[in-house]
């Protein structure tokens, strides 16, 4: 039976654990965010959270640095304590060693090495365990971890900013800025939270972005560019900073070779702004140049043949998952977004909407490609939420492909 302590319920202490867990955002991937609160005599006597990948877990951080006697105390943790030796010792060991009386767990782990075993071990040593305290909130906090552990694929969140009439830029191409400073600051939090950031070559050619994280103490995501024909400008900021920020370029050798050998290559690429400066003349020279700059070239098969070949994004996700990239913030243009939705690789959407109108039949939209013919077949979102950032709003939710 779960009783109140000093006027607080187990849910209150679990919320404290969740708040602590969020402090590890962007620092613990591909591990989950975990917070821990130790309570004795109705008072919180210790707190801890998983601070960085490879460091001690939340329970161990709370217990080893506690200056008070913890025997007989209650411990609250949003995820089942681990029971295996990894980069750090099992958390079940120190809980047993410190003679904790009761453990309140938000949700069970899905890692096969834990998955209920941590709870079993604690109970076998006479420790009372309650599971399911704020379970939905605890699972949502670590939706990336749960998805990656179950599928070994990155959790992909598609993010875009648009005007009230559904445009991501004016007909002239100008897009600075669709949303205000508050919304853009939140996007930097997302870049810190997700392990990778993905964009298409069109975005690089049009905006010359850095795709980095500009928040204080933030972590730069791994930059992943979809550049089927290897057309990235050699003097782009992405290329020039690849030695400092991990960068992966997904491409297709067949499509690139056809492009570089075409008669229109020079006419097409050398005319583009910023592309002619010192650009290699052959595909082989381009490969060598990019690798010298520190860019990882990842070969990806085509989804289909055609005049505008597209990469097989599902294959790309498998490759990225094998590299330990558990999550991706997709900041693509309309075509890449459409392809990602079509291949069902997107799991969440962050749609920022600004209260402004720009009109224009040719102004770009966040999702292009071949449209769905019937409204009843539209891809829907579930578990939707709406947040305000200054004058802008953000609608977010999980994809429902059923």
Image (cartoon, rainbow, N blue to C red):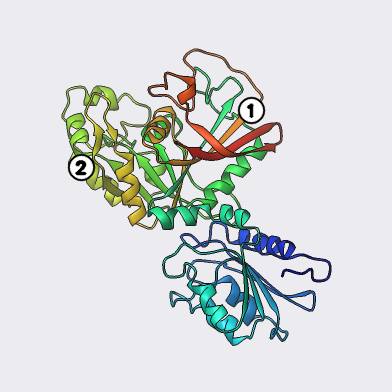
What is the number of the mark on residue 285?
Answer: 2
For residue 7, say whether it is visible. Answer: yes
Mark 2: which secondary structure?
helix
Pick out the residue farthest to the right.
Answer: 7
Mark 1: which secondary structure?
strand
Residue 206, above or below 13: above
Query: Could you tell me if the residues under marks 2 and 1 are in contact, i.e. CB atoms within 8 Å?
Result: no
Residue at (59, 17) in percent of width and height:
358
**Can you give x and y, in whole percent of width and height, for residue 303 in the image?**
26, 34
Pick out the residue farthest to the top.
Answer: 361
Q: Determine whether, in the image, residue 215 is placed left or right of residue 279.
A: right
Frontmost residue, 343 versus 194: 343
**Can you give x and y, in whole percent of width and height, for residue 110 in the image?**
47, 62
Residue 150 occupies quadrant: bottom left
For the residues labelled 2 and 1, the Cα–Cα distance comes to: 44 Å
Residue 90, above or below 291: below
**Can you give x and y, in whole percent of width and height, for residue 118 in the image?**
51, 74
**Can you give x and y, in whole percent of width and height, for residue 16 in the image?**
70, 63
Q: How many residues crowd mark 2 within 10 Å: few (<14), some (14–19), many (20+)?
A: few
Residue 87 occupies quadrant: bottom left
Name the residue carrying label 1.
354
Q: Determine whether, in the image, residue 302 is placed left or right of residue 323.
A: left
Residue at (46, 70) in percent of width and height:
114
Residue 225, above or below 363: below
């Amino acid at each position: 039976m779960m009783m109140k302590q000093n006027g607080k319920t187990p849910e209150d202490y679990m919320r404290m654990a969740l708040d602590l867990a969020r402090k590890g955002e962007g620092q613990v991937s591909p591990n989950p965010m975990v917070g821990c609160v130790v309570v004795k005599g109705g008072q919180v006597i210790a707190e801890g959270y998983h601070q960085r990948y490879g460091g001690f877990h939340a329970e161990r951080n709370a217990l080893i640095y506690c200056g008070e006697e913890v025997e007989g105390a209650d411990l609250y943790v949003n995820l089942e304590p681990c029971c295996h030796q990894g980069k750090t010792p099992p958390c079940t060991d120190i809980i047993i060693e410190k003679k904790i009386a009761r453990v309140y767990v938000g949700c069970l782990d899905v890692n096969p090495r834990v998955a209920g075993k941590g709870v079993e071990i604690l109970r076998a040593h006479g420790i009372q365990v309650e599971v399911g305290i704020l379970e939905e909130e605890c699972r949502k906090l670590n939706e990336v971890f749960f998805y990656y552990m179950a599928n070994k694929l990155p959790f992909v969140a598609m993010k875009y900013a648009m005007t009230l009439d559904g445009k991501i830029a004016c007909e002239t191409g100008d897009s600075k800025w669709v949303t205000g400073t508050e919304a853009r600051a939140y996007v930097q939090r997302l870049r810190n939270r997700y392990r990778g950031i993905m964009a298409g070559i069109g975005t690089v050619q049009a905006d010359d972005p850095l795709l980095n994280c500009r928040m204080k103490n933030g972590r730069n995501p791994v930059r992943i560019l979809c550049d089927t024909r290897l057309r990235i400008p050699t003097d782009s900021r992405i290329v020039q900073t690849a030695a400092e920020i991990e960068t992966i370029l997904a491409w297709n050798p067949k499509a690139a070779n056809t492009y570089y050998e075409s008669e229109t290559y020079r006419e097409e690429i050398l005319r583009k702004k910023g592309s002619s400066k010192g650009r290699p003349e052959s595909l082989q020279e381009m490969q060598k140049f990019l690798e010298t700059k520190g860019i990882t070239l990842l070969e990806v098969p085509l989804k289909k043949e055609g005049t505008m070949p597209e990469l097989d994004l599902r294959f790309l996700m498998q490759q990225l998952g094998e590299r330990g990239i558990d999550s991706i913030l997709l900041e693509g243009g309309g075509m890449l977004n459409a392809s990602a939705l079509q291949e069902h690789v997107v799991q969440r959407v962050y749609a920022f909407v600004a209260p402004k109108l720009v009109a224009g039949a040719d102004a770009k939209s966040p999702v292009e490609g071949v449209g769905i013919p019937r409204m009843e077949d539209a891809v829907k979102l579930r578990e939707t939420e709406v947040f305000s950032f200054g004058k802008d709003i953000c609608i977010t939710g999980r994809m429902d492909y059923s």
